[in-house]
Image (cartoon, rainbow, N blue to C red):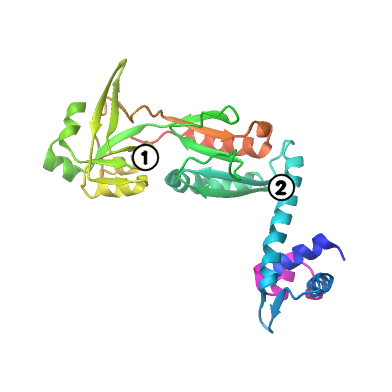
Amino acid sequence: MDKLQALSMFVETVRCGGYSAAARKLGVATSSVTRQVAALEAGLGTTLLNRSTRHSSPTLVGQDYYDKAVAILDALAEADAAVFDRGSEARGRLRVSVPVEFGRRVIAPHLGRLLARHAELEISLNLSDRMVDPLQESVDLCIRLGSALTNDDIVSKPIGRFERWLVASPDYLEATGLPRQPHDVLAHACLLFDYAPALQHWSFRDGDECLQVPVQGRLRSNNADVLREAALGGAGLALLADWLVAEDVRQGRLNRVLEGFEVSPGSASGLINALYLPSHRDSSRIRAFIAFVEEILAVPATR
């Protein structure tokens, strides 16, 4: 018995829910799958699958064995990918972490083009607004906006920039008046990204001059699109990325406020950074994904 082949067939049988479906996916005869799984059970001296005429599911022991078999096969695939990853063509699985709305709105619409360009590349895309550390977690590449890990063990490569726009709905501005100077925002409801203590500052830069204005509001969220929706509903002023609200501004659903200033939350920058381990400097997978993001970001948001 080829143990790795048997493991692969067992794993696929669990995933597909039966021998026939697994055989079709693997492109082999159903009898081959049945024989390999039976040999695996015989060698282990236990039953791994509950069988019926239409469906197969793992036993309690089989589920534990399945989990460990998946880990083994994934590790083997990763080992193979690490060897191939130094070549000119991107191949194998790339685990990427990106901020939630950036991933949904900026990255996801173009993934088909990336996969078509690199036929042997697999992408595992995780959406998270928290700061993921590739040194501590099973992630090959992190894309982060406005900040980077200050860690000598992590490569932080700037791959683009974005702007933050201060926006509000036309109805809100008609009811409250248009802010003319940075301090005017003190009289407005501010919609805040929930990333810092209760008192936050928005920084307004005009050339070499920078003014920090303390802002407070009754609505906070850790999701930028929640703040965007609240702004669309007339809840107040929101400081949001241009790629998130450019279409709303173009369609007149939101108006930009204090356009003459470069606005940011505190000291946050407008950089977009790619974070990865130094051992991945020569990774063709990472190079391919970074080039893909740089290509997307080369098209600026429409005012």
Q: Position of residue 206 (x, y in %)?
A: 28, 20
196 or 182, which lies in front? 196
Residue 179 in sight here: no
**What secondary structure is the magenta-colored segment mainly?**
helix
| Identity of the residue furthest to the bottom in this view | 53
Q: Quadrant of residue 57?
A: bottom right
Q: Quadrant of residue 65?
A: bottom right
The residue carrying mark 1 is: 195
Residue at image location 79% in from the left, 68% down from the top: 28
Residue numbers of the magenta segment? 14-31
Q: Position of residue 174 (x, y in %)?
A: 13, 41
Residue at image location 41% in from the left, 29% down from the top: 270
| Identity of the residue furthest to the top in this view | 208
Q: CA distance from mark 1 to mark 2?
A: 35 Å
244 or 215, which lies in front? 215
Residue 195 magenta-drawn?
Answer: no
- Sequence-wise, the earlier of marks 1 and 2 is 2
Residue 78: image tag: 2
Q: Position of residue 124 (x, y in %)?
A: 59, 50
Residue 96: image tag: none
Q: With 128 as the anchor, is 267 left or right in this view?
A: left
Point out the frontmost of discs 1 and 2: 1
Local crowd size for mark 1, using a 10 Å CA cut-off: few (<14), some (14–19), many (≥20)? some
Q: With 246 as the anchor, is 173 left or right in this view?
A: left
Q: Position of residue 138 (x, y in %)?
A: 61, 45
Residue at image location 26% in from the left, 29% down from the top: 259
Q: With 207 as the anchor, is 13 left or right in this view?
A: right
Q: With 114 as the anchor, is 235 left or right in this view?
A: left
Name the kind of residue labelled 1 in the image. Answer: Tyr
Location of the N terminus by quadrant is bottom right
Location of the C terminus by quadrant is top left
Disc 1, SS: loop
